[in-house]
Amino acid sequence: MQHQAISRRDRQPGLTSPVWAVNAGPAPKVESLSGAHEVDVLVIGGGIAGVTTALHLAEKRVDVALVEAGQFGDGATGQSGGIVAPDYIRHTPDSIQAVLGEAAGERLTRMIGGSGQHVFDLIRRHEIECDARQDGFYTPSHTDALAAQQRDYARQWQTRGHKVSFVEGVQARALFGADRYCGALRFEEGGGLNPLAFVRGLARAAQRSGARLFGNSPVTRLERKDGYWLCRTPIGTVRAQRLVLAANGGNAALHPAMQRTSLPLNVFQFASMPLDPAQRQAILPRGGAFTDKLPYLFTARLDGLGHLISAFPMSFMVNGDRACYREARRRLKQHFKVMPEPQIDFLWHGLAWVNTSFLPEIYDLGDNAIAIQACNGRGIATNTVIGSELATMLATGDRDALSVQPRAPVPVRFHAGASLLPRFLMSLAYLTN
Ligand SMILES: Cc1cc2nc3c(=O)[nH]c(=O)nc-3n(C[C@H](O)[C@H](O)[C@H](O)COP(=O)(O)OP(=O)(O)OC[C@H]3O[C@@H](n4cnc5c(N)ncnc54)[C@H](O)[C@@H]3O)c2cc1C
């Protein structure tokens, strides 16, 4: 399905397509896969993970093809909020060591902490027009206890050379235009972008570098034959020596070992009507993007057209399109006094896939097949780096190129029940919000 710029004012009631299509520019010209092809590496999935892998492989002169079911960015990438967040979701630089050990922990911290700069450098290198703004990513604290912890988290990042600081309460409230926070962690190298324009720009760069890209080509069958991977789409085949699965939630249908390895997190993402001058002066006046740490989390950023972009997780409490629009308005009113009557122009549904570790995972499936499972609702920056590192590993054979060490996939126990957990937990969080 190709994104179309349908806003609330054009089409009522109901959900719209993501706001990003308004100024993402045209989709790259790609054909459907037809006939029989042979390549060294086949990548499946045209989101940020697959496209960056293909781009960097092609730059290293590896013969690579990428097959996408729909259009590039149709998955979580184009549904996302476009926040570039070089931070852990649950961990800190110190706490990750307890999970991974010192060397692997430091390595991952270096990767996560540097992922914002990596994204903006890549955009500059390929001159991608994607409304990129490196104006900071913040995680605000809603209690004094969290603020005290975050002062320590800032120190943890700083001692490792990252540009992270703690912004005290008054200053944080002025930076956000929201008065419910008592400080914030600031990641200077983070920011925001138009994720659809970003992935389209990367896809064009991959094509220019020699990658063969195919759209509207869902992989219907994947099998091992005569020592090769054979992938079938409705009207074509690709035979490859090596395979990268970058289909996010779609990985489960492509390889049996990927079944039941991640959990669905449904999110509603929305964009307000462009703010008026008074609102723009009050809300995020110096730009930046933030995601708070409350269970029913709140997030906000502005795009280049002045839309305020935010989101809320799906719960059992908000049902139906009208209720979603009501909830979007309630959230904006709750946080921003200067928006007593917010108008919502775009509201769309997105599906993120979460690992129980809340960490990016790379799975070694054997037979020269690797899977990237690193969405976690936070993969714009990290998956961009993972694609680059994975390409280096595939081109050189050096596993030390990877900051995330590949391991065997482990199914989530009681997966059917566990899949309901995110929505159930978000319902509880909604009630306490
Ligand atoms: C609502 C929402 C908001 C988010 N906001 C942010 C944010 O602000 N910042 C952030 O960092 N992260 C955010 N995320 C997470 C981020 O979008 C993801 O981590 C990232 O985009 C995942 O990229 P990916 O390439 O792994 O997967 P995807 O973008 O999902 O790409 C996978 C692709 O595989 C294709 N595919 C699936 N099955 C097949 C098949 N059989 N054959 C061929 N192709 C197939 C799909 O069509 C899709 O295009 C958000 C996610 C959602 C859902």
Image (cartoon, rainbow, N blue to C red):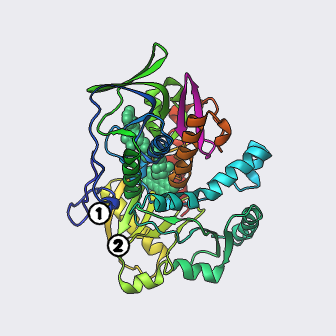
Vertical arrangement, residue 381 with respect to residue 290, above or below: above
The amino acid on which the numbered mark 2 sits, given as a three-letter code, is Leu
From where the camera sits, is residue 317 visible?
A: no
Res 170 quadrant in image: bottom right
For mark 1, give the secondary structure.
Answer: helix
Q: Is residue 389 left or right of residue 194?
A: right
- Residue 239 in view, yes or no: yes
Q: Residue at x 60, y 59 (%)?
A: 86
Separation of marks 1 and 2 at Cα, in angstroms: 9 Å
Specify which label sits upstream in the sequence, 1 or 2: 1
Circle 2 packing at 10 Å, graded few (<14), some (14-19), many (20+), is few
Amino acid identity at mark 1: Val
**Residue 219 in the image, given as x and y percentages of width and height:** 36, 30
Q: Disc 2 marks which residue?
A: 305
Residue in front for this viewpoint, 88 or 340: 88
Horizontal relation, residue 147 to residue 413: left or right: right
Which residue in the structure is indicated by mark 1?
22
Looking at the image, is 318 positioned above or below residue 155? above
* Magenta region: 355-373
Q: Based on the picture, tell me whether residue 128 belongs to the magenta stretch.
A: no
